[in-house]
Amino acid sequence: MTLENAQQHVDGRNFPTLVELLKWRALHQSQQVAYTFLVDGEDDAVSITFGQLDRRAKAIAAQLAAQGVGAQAVLLLYPAGLEFIVAFFGALYAGAIAVPLYPPHRNRPDQRLAAVIADSDARYLMTTADILGEMARYVAQTPALAALRGIATDTDTAACAALAQPAQTLPHPSHTAFLQYTSGSTSSPKGVMVSHRNLMANLELIRQSFGHTEKLKMIGWLPLFHDMGLVGNTLQPLYVGGQLVFMSPVHFLQNPMRWLRTISRHRATTSGGPNFAYDFCVRRSTPEQRAGLDLSSWEVAFNGAEPVRLETLDRFAAAFAPHGFRRGAFLPCYGMAEATLLLAAGDRGQRPVSLRLDSAALLQDRVRVAADDAGKVSNNVGCGQIADAEKIAIVDPQTLSACAPDRVGEIWVAGDSVTQGYWNRPAETREKYHARLAGSDATFLRTGDLGFIHGNELFITGRLKDLIIIRGANYYPQDIERSIEEAHPAVRESCCAAFSVEVEGEERLLVALEVDRKYVRALDLDELTMAVQRNVFLHHELRPHVVCVLKPGGIPKTSSGKIRRGACKDGFLNGNLDLLTDASIPKPDSSTKNSLETA
């Protein structure tokens, strides 16, 4: 579509790429502020307009062209801030394939970064002049960086020189816009190839599901190099012509009330994050600290990226309803990098849908609504309906046949948001992206997530690879981890892992947990272990075979904060978990069975 014919459009529905949409906004909304970064997480703000963003992005694109980058992968290593956003659009303008990543560690090796460098075949990195000036320190910790040619994009000299270069050819919608490296929670990071067409399709799904217009005021703190922070927080405002005000994730983690104060002060309409963020705000704030908040402008409080807990929604709504928060603002959602971002979302303005399920039936992959007098029940929160443009199937992962409506199965999806596959991994792409139902030629993306559909609502029950099977019964690790958290006040919030290992031919449950720093010195380990075993048995009729008590920070997590259960299991098997005590935990084989039983 030409710019002349597109002038009546406010959102990006009729633009083939974000680059062409940005050009239009720069022409017709040049002075409108697009992004505002809170440098200190509070009041120290810097902003950029659509016009400034377009000019700087074009300058960086010319700079990349002068370096001969071309249509290849280039790493973006930036701290939180406007420079990342400018560089991302500069890469898009240049036709390069952006690879968003967090800057490397100064004082320890960055294994994930090294793995991404090897997998992406990148030869260039874009970053700030400050980081490039200290590259020798980073290379000392992560030698793989030495092979990359660094390009500083935040210097006036470079930008001015680049402006003299000829304009670039706009990318085609089918071209790969960026590689979203998966979190690596169950395996090594893989580069998801997101095309310009995928981006535009998913941004439209978000617009429809969240009801966004040009009046959108987004408040964010999520990492910009992850799908929710990049696509949902950063690109959606550009798509609809709204604005993003954001802070560093570190500023949020230091004081979660900064997030809510920013929503109140800037009159946000949309903001959100993983389930833990809402719990974090309740637990790390007092009634006195909440005084003065006005959350009445908050229309969409999305909750995704990890299991949505009904008790979290209840606690947050109770704590902040006196300050204008409406429970109907909660919008549970479900998505993944392989589908660009969003796959399903609840109804805007409606209270989230929840089901009380019979826990015993759920262990057998059966969906049975619990009676009022039922014993053990599981409260499950729905993630909404798959968007109209998408297809969904609930599939038996063994037979590859569609499940009956009352059965739990693997979630398969199809649609324009489903990405192109994994970078340089054809075999894994075929396995993940080209699944076929028995007796059908239609292809689907296998999400690896387990769930079911009830009353047109999608419910997620867990991850296929994380599923714990003991004596023929299925146990979801997040349910066990919740029981561990509730067992003792010394257990650190959202820092538990449940997994199984084979001992003498039988699967046994193991759990690992972090201790909250304030309890370390006066901790009674026996009391803690007994409390965990008692609570897990009470709720699941399972006795943890081993309870691994780790130091603060000892639980392996992805860069987005997800528990790496597979890494916990590997750490146990290899004897390298960061235990609170010096006692070693034996490997679960027949030669160490006796010592394992008493661990």
Image (cartoon, rainbow, N blue to C red):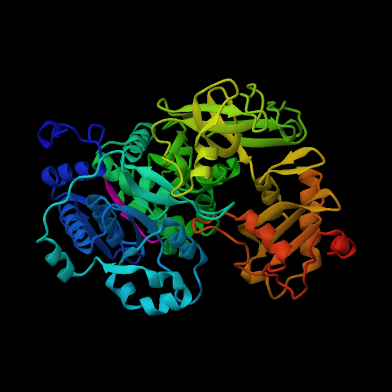
In percent of width and height, residue 294 lies at 37, 49
Q: Judge left or right: residue 496 versus residue 243.
A: right
Let me know if residue 598 appears in the view.
no
In percent of width and height, residue 88 lies at 29, 55
**Residue nearest the observer in this picture, 447 or 35:** 447
Q: Quadrant of residue 389?
A: top left
Query: At 77% across and 71% down in the image, what residue appears?
Result: 584
Q: Judge left or right: residue 461 versus residue 34.
A: right
**Residue nearest the observer in this picture, 160 or 482:** 160
In percent of width and height, residue 369 lies at 68, 26
In percent of width and height, residue 118 lies at 46, 61
Let me know if residue 308 appears in the view.
yes
Q: Is residue 440 magenta?
A: no
The quadrant of the image that shows the N terminus is top left
Q: Judge left or right: residue 185 versus residue 421.
A: right
Q: Does the magenta stretch include residue 245?
A: yes
- The mark tally for this picture is 0
Query: At 62% across and 62% down in the image, what residue appears?
Result: 555
**Residue nearest the observer in this picture, 363 or 447:** 447
The quadrant of the image that shows the C terminus is bottom right
Query: At 46% across and 64% down in the image, what residue appears?
Result: 113
Q: In this view, does 444 lie above or below 298?
A: above
Q: In this view, does 396 lie above or below 62?
A: above
Q: Judge left or right: residue 511 versus residue 230.
A: right
Q: Give the range drawn in magenta.
A: 242-248
